[in-house]
Amino acid sequence: MRSRAWPLRVAVQTASVAWAAWIALNAAYLVAWADQTRTPPPALSALAGLFPFGPEAGSLSIEDYCPFGPLEGVVRAAQGLAAGRGLSFVGPVTLRNLGVLFAVAALVLLTKKTFCSWLCPFGALFEALGWIGRRLGVRQARLPGRWDRRLRRLRYAVLAVLVGLTGWAGYLVFKEVDPFFALYTVGSAAAPVGGYVVLAVLAAGALVVPGAWCHYLCPLGAALDPISRLGRIRITRADPACTRCDRCSRACPQRIPVARRQRVTDALCTNCLRCLDACDRGALELRLEVRP
Ligand code: SF4
Ligand code: SF4
């Protein structure tokens, strides 16, 4: 059974993927062709004319909207501030990326990690791959709970390594293997080969281990965890209606024991609403709660 929010979530995810693909099309193809003084096909030129930034924006790419860049370069930024050089970024990160990061953090502060299951184009793509895998009859793996909990800590290690290496090297080291950047600059000379390799491995992995990237590797998701714990819009459970059937817990992709929570304050909750879908007693609801 699906809640009324399910079509809305899919629609938002589709819009998010389409938006990212639109930027990729604009930047990776039209700009590249313009650089090579080749004339883009008329249909693509017409589409680019509709895009608010247009091919004349030159270097505009998906990385201009990436919230992870300022995080990855936080050591360098701190060093610059400590040395009195003011706020500086590791190129090509700009103030726009910092604005996107703050916007994502504010959203998480209000709605927990809704960003992950509603807005992140990468999360949406991997979720779609998991769905395709199930439709194709691919046998999907579910790690034992102990291993799942251990592997989730890997995200913090990935975050620490990327921040440390970028601070040491002075450039965005993740870009060399960034599957997100590879996906959304496909066909462009800017796309890193390492990113394609990682992307292929993750795409294959998503077919057999649903949520592998988001659950075990995503450094942005790891960085958002502490803020998510404070998120005010969250799942709450009404005791009188609940039969303790545990269906909500089993439906949760984050393995949160929803049936044992009065309110889901867990950092991992992405407000995907699957627990709401699973509860046929109407015992769960999404609420704005001001108190901690
Ligand atoms: S699915 Fe509904 S009734 Fe069952 S344990 Fe969860 S909240 Fe309670
Ligand atoms: S199933 Fe419920 S508790 Fe689990 S992540 Fe989704 S909204 Fe949060």
Image (spheres, grey):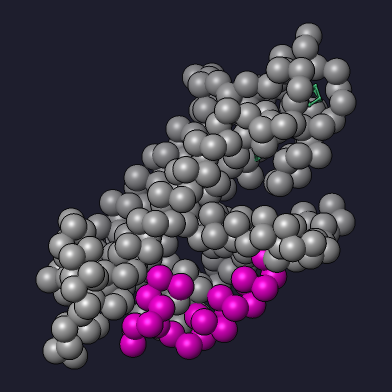
Residue at 47 percent of width and 69 percent of height: 180
Residue that lies at the very extreme toward the front in this rendered image: 42
State whether the magenta stretch is mostly helix, strand or loop.
helix
Image quarter for ligand 1: top right
Residue that lies at the very extreme toward the bottom in this rendered image: 36
Q: Is residue 193 magenta?
A: yes
Residue at 18 percent of width and 57 percent of height: 50
Q: Quadrant of the N terminus?
A: top right
Q: Where is residue 75 in the image (x, y as percent from the top left)?
A: 40, 68
Tell me which corner region of the image, top left, top right, bottom left or bottom right, holds residue 240. top right
Quick one: 258 or 2, which is closer to the camera? Answer: 2
Q: In the figure, 47 relative to 164: above or below?
A: above
Residue 165 shows in the view:
no
Tell me which corner region of the image, top left, top right, bottom left or bottom right, holds residue 171. bottom left
The range drawn in magenta is 183-206
Query: In the picture provided, is 3 more to the left or to the right than 46?
Result: right
Q: Position of residue 131 (x, y in %)?
A: 67, 55
Q: Where is residue 170 in the image (x, y as percent from the top left)?
A: 36, 80
Residue that lies at the very extreme toward the top in this rendered image: 240
Quick one: 117 or 16, which is closer to the camera? Answer: 16
